[in-house]
Image (spheres, helix red, strand yellow):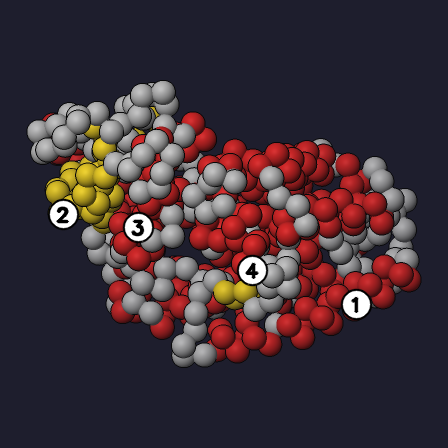
Amino acid sequence: MDWFIAPDYWLSRLVFQRALAAVYLVAFLTAAVQFRALLGERGMLPVPRFTARVPFRRAPSLFHLYCSDRFCAGCAWAGCAVSAALLAGLDALVPLGAAMALWLVLWVLYLSIVNVGQTWYAFGWESLLLETGFLAVFLGNDEVAPPVVVLFLLRWLLFRVEFGAGLIKMRGDPCWRNLTCLHHHHETQPMPGPFSRWFHHLPKPLHRVETAANHVTQLAVPFLLFTPQPVATAAASLMIVTQLWLVLSGNFSWLNWLTITLALPTVRFPGGDAPASAPDTAPLWFEVLVLAVAALLLFLSYHPVANMLSRRQVMNRSFDPLHLVNTYGAFGSVNRVRYEVILEGTTDEVPHEDSGWQAYEFRGKPGDPRRRPRQFAPYHLRLDWLMWFAALSPGYAEPWFGKLVERLLEGDRATLRLLRSSPFPPDAPPRYIRARLFRYRFTTRRELRETGAHWVRAYVREYLPPTRLAGPAQRL
């Protein structure tokens, strides 16, 4: 038997590849639906303007070679098609080289989107998907058993995701150390889910247990990934359970689902050995290529490890433009109060406080207090997430918020499709738009029964004064 391969992880690889293809599919679908409004030629942060000032070597992307809304949409939909084909098992029906090429196509397409995505794609799970997707290129198909070294690199990646997140918490907000962060987190997280209110109202002692269990899972359990079976399987399974708990309590795009996917290759499924007809060796060219890539990735791990061990650890940073090896982390600090920016428009010629201001409703972020939060993850509502950051500080919104208001004043159809509802049709946009900042909190059980509202909100201050277009085609 070839030392290079691990035939007893045959089924583990298969489950991992299908799960990763599903995550890729969601990621490309998100891009296909939202790209025009966010990054298109008339988007809030146009890609052509970005590629004109940022050289290829700093942000490698197909869109440096050519960029149009149609081409960008074509790349996103092509990614959807290839992802769906791999989800259906196409890689098992083609030669090893062709299967690797299919996974490489997905990685190149998504890298091209992320590297021009600017603020809209500045999330840790973008780099995590790229790093995971790059490793998937070298995991093989039915012509060869899973390479041991790639399985190790997947565990190494999962270790950095969990351990890095645990360290950033312990070094960050004191509430993680005194076990009180979850007194606030479920209410103040970027996008609550349908059960977040229930989690928020759990007894505080149980919140402390949640926090302590999180520390154990992120700071101790990751080391068990490198132990013999069945201990490694138990460690990965505990991580999966923890991630499912997070799936129930919030909307974190595909972060939790991708972390679950990363844990799957460590799980040794019963009866998951290679079939008797499977080759018991790997092609020489495949071994040489995998070992060379593994050596490169281990060399590139220096900076992420140095960051992870540093007292000045930073979250979610890439150290190379290809996002091959990155550092991860989440919620080094937890907000105690939830703020929301509410956008309102009016058709009045001269706006005043008694004008008929009507609110725009977003798909995921809180707005109407009576509307219960919905589950959207793993789909990523990028505008909704950035609106959460905008409520924290106007500085986060500076690159794009003015463009958003401008597009709403123009009745831009692509932008309106990002919203749940608009009180103004595209052909009759408002004359003025304003933004106001509100403080939100979950209702108590009694308040929910009496009012039917899931949130209570209080006006804080003006965020943007009534604003209009200077002319039909002019900017604000």
Q: Position of residue 109 (x, y in %)?
A: 66, 46
* Mark 4 nearby-residue class (10 Å; few <14, some 14–19, many ≥20): few
Mark nearer the viewer, 3 or 1: 3
Q: First in sequence: mark 4 or mark 3? A: 4
* Mark 1 nearby-residue class (10 Å; few <14, some 14–19, many ≥20): some
CA gap, disc 1 and disc 2: 58 Å
| Residue that mark 4 sits on | 54
Q: First in sequence: mark 3 or mark 1? A: 1
The quadrant in which the N terminus is found is bottom right
CA gap, disc 4 and disc 3: 25 Å
Q: First in sequence: mark 3 or mark 2? A: 3
Q: Quadrant of residue 235?
A: bottom right
What amino acid is found at the position of numbered circle 4 in the picture? Val
Q: Secondary structure at mark 1?
A: helix
User: Which residue is drawn at the image coordinates 68% and 68% (left, top)?
Assistant: 297
CA gap, disc 3 and disc 2: 14 Å
What amino acid is found at the position of numbered circle 3 in the picture? Ala
What amino acid is found at the position of numbered circle 1 in the picture? Leu
What amino acid is found at the position of numbered circle 2 in the picture? Arg
Q: Position of residue 321 (x, y in %)?
A: 60, 63
Q: Secondary structure at mark 4?
A: loop
| Residue that mark 2 sits on | 461
User: Which residue is drawn at the image coordinates 58% and 37% (left, top)?
Assistant: 69
Q: First in sequence: mark 4 or mark 1? A: 4
